[in-house]
Image: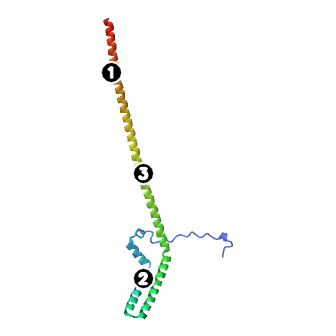
């Protein structure tokens, strides 16, 4: 029995992406050129086959032209055209078939790039913080040195003032003593 109204229909569960066999393979995303070439050859084996057919047809056309066999040369040029068409169809078909994996690879590359940029920014911030800490430490040492120099200069000035005061006081005392002695002598 069909439900009477649309509201009574149960909701469809959300679509989940198909699990990929490449998700758990770190070598899939971190590959060198030779591995990539091997993977491409395994993914799309018809493309190299089409290229090989095209090259074979061109080589046979060259041989036919050198022999003067125009019928065979014409036949091989047609074969070259068929080989190129086959290669083109294989490329387009493989491109459509492996589009999801390419999108996954691109997303992984994008995430990896963002992580690298974030790490670079964090290293840059740490470097700036370290430089700032060094600068603050230098400024504190400089301020302490200035204060120490000012304190030493103040102590020296005070000591010099006291020594001058004693000298001036002793001279004045000596003058008063002389005056007092003169008065006593009179």
Identify the residue under disc 2: 51
Q: Quadrant of residue 68?
A: bottom left
Q: Quadrant of residue 26?
A: bottom left
The answer to whether 4 appears left or right of 107 in the picture is right
Name the image quarter holding the C terminus.
top left
Horizontal and vertical percent position of residue 148: 37, 35
Q: Earlier in the sequence, mark 1 or mark 2?
A: 2
Horizontal and vertical percent position of residue 39: 41, 75
Identify the residue under disc 3: 128
Q: Image point 32% across, 12% down: which residue?
A: 178
* Colour treatment of the image: rainbow
- In the foreground, 150 or 70: 70
Q: CA distance from mark 2 to mark 3?
A: 55 Å
**Mark 1 residue crowding within 10 angstroms, few (<14) / some (14–19) / many (20+):** few
Q: Earlier in the sequence, mark 2 or mark 3?
A: 2
Q: Earlier in the sequence, mark 3 or mark 1?
A: 3
Identify the residue under disc 1: 167
Query: Is residue 136 placed above or below 122 in the rendered structure?
Result: above
């Amino acid at each position: 029995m069909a439900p009477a109204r649309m509201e009574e229909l149960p909701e469809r569960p959300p679509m989940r992406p198909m699990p990929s066999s490449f998700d758990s393979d770190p070598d899939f995303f971190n590959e060198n050129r030779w591995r990539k070439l091997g993977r491409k050859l395994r993914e799309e084996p018809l493309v190299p086959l089409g290229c090989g057919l095209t090259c074979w047809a061109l080589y046979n056309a060259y041989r036919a032209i050198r022999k003067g066999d125009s019928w065979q040369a014409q036949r091989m040029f047609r074969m070259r055209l068929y080989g190129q068409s086959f290669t083109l169809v294989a490329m387009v078909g493989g491109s459509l078939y492996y589009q999801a994996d390419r999108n996954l690879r691109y997303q992984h590359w994008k995430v990896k790039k963002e992580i690298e940029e974030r790490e670079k920014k964090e290293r840059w911030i740490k470097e700036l913080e370290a430089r700032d800490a060094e600068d603050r430490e230098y400024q504190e040492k400089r301020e302490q040195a200035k204060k120490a120099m000012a304190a030493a200069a103040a102590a020296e000035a005070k000591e010099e003032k006291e020594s001058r005061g004693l000298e001036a006081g002793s001279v004045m005392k000596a003058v008063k003593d002389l005056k007092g002695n003169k008065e006593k002598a009179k």
